[in-house]
Image (cartoon, rainbow, N blue to C red):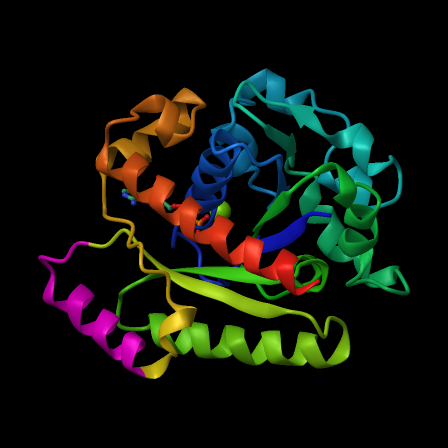
Amino acid sequence: MATIISIVNQKGGVAKTTTAINLSAALGAMGKKVLLVDLDPQGNATTGYGYAGAAKKNLENTTYEVLMGEVRPAQAVLATKFKNVSLMPATANLAEAEIRLLQFQNKTLCLKKALLQIKDSYDIIIVDCLPSLGVLALNGLCACDRIIIPMQCEPYSLEGVAELLATVKRVKKSHNRNLQLMGIVFTMLDKRLTVNREVMRSIKAKFPEDTIFKTEIPRNVRISEAPSHGEPIMYYDPGSKGAEAYNLLAKEVAKKCKAIEEML
Ligand code: ADP
Ligand code: MG
């Protein structure tokens, strides 16, 4: 049965989607059967996997229809060109879910219910959450076993993460007692910048060592180019620093998933 990992941070532009795309590709390349669930109306993970323009617009079965109970989850899963990675895509209509879900009785548990139906077909399910702590993002928190928090080392980052972890604590109490932080991953890091180094130091001082991934993702222009080519970084430029970093992160994640399986 799959370990479900949600990539969350209510702040936008911290590399959630970049991490979701590249981590799933790297885990797939390692031989894990991976499903990437796009839980953001911007649908950037969908685009990053090559469904752009008309191909994206014409998608009929997406995360939205799954959450609304209009199609079975398996019907919305697409194959990708990349080894072992399947995709549940999202388009702009997912924004309506934020309103429509409020009328549902178990409004934060719709994604969990859906993923339960297909969990056995994968080793790892990665959920790319939208930048918010609204009902849609809460579905991402309620559905998963672990969260990964991508974080840029900037002055306000720590406050954001503190707020997020308070929400995680509430969700753990009310809906998902197994929920745990898998780790914080530093993204877009430029160690030449004093501010990056200082914020990183203060975060490391606040969190236990095993809750921060050893792999740091450097700022790398090839990473930012890859999505417009519809390819994860390890296919777009396998020799880049970015590909190397995401491969190492995938190894750490696979190790932590193995430890979870062994606990069960
Ligand atoms: P989020 O999903 O948290 O909103 P994205 O993954 O979309 O963030 O990333 C925001 C922007 O930063 C994108 O343009 C992306 O290409 C860029 N980016 C992410 N990670 C890196 C990196 N390591 N180096 C350079 N650019 C990056
Ligand atoms: Mg995103």
Q: Which residues are magenta?
A: 190-205
**Dominant SS in magenta:** helix
At 38% from the left edge and 49% from the top edge, which residue is drawn?
A: 249
Q: Does residue 116 appear left or right of residue 57 in this picture?
A: right
Q: Does residue 217 appear left or right of residue 17 in this picture?
A: left
- Residue 231, given in percent of the width and then of the height, sits at 43, 24
Q: Quadrant of residue 186?
A: bottom left
Q: Is residue 223 visible?
A: yes
Residue 193 in the magenta stretch? The answer is yes
- Residue 23, given in percent of the width and then of the height, sits at 46, 42
Looking at the rendering, the quadrant in which ligand 1 lies is top left
Q: Does residue 190 appear left or right of residue 87 in this picture?
A: left
Q: Does residue 251 appear left or right of residue 173 in this picture?
A: left
- Residue 125, given in percent of the width and then of the height, sits at 63, 45
Q: Quadrant of residue 133?
A: bottom right
At 22% from the left edge and 75% from the top edge, which residue is drawn?
A: 201
Out of 260 and 229, give the one closest to the viewer.
Answer: 260
- Residue 199, given in percent of the width and then of the height, sits at 23, 72
Residue 189, compared with residue 58, is above or below; it is below
Out of 114 and 164, give the one closest to the viewer.
Answer: 114
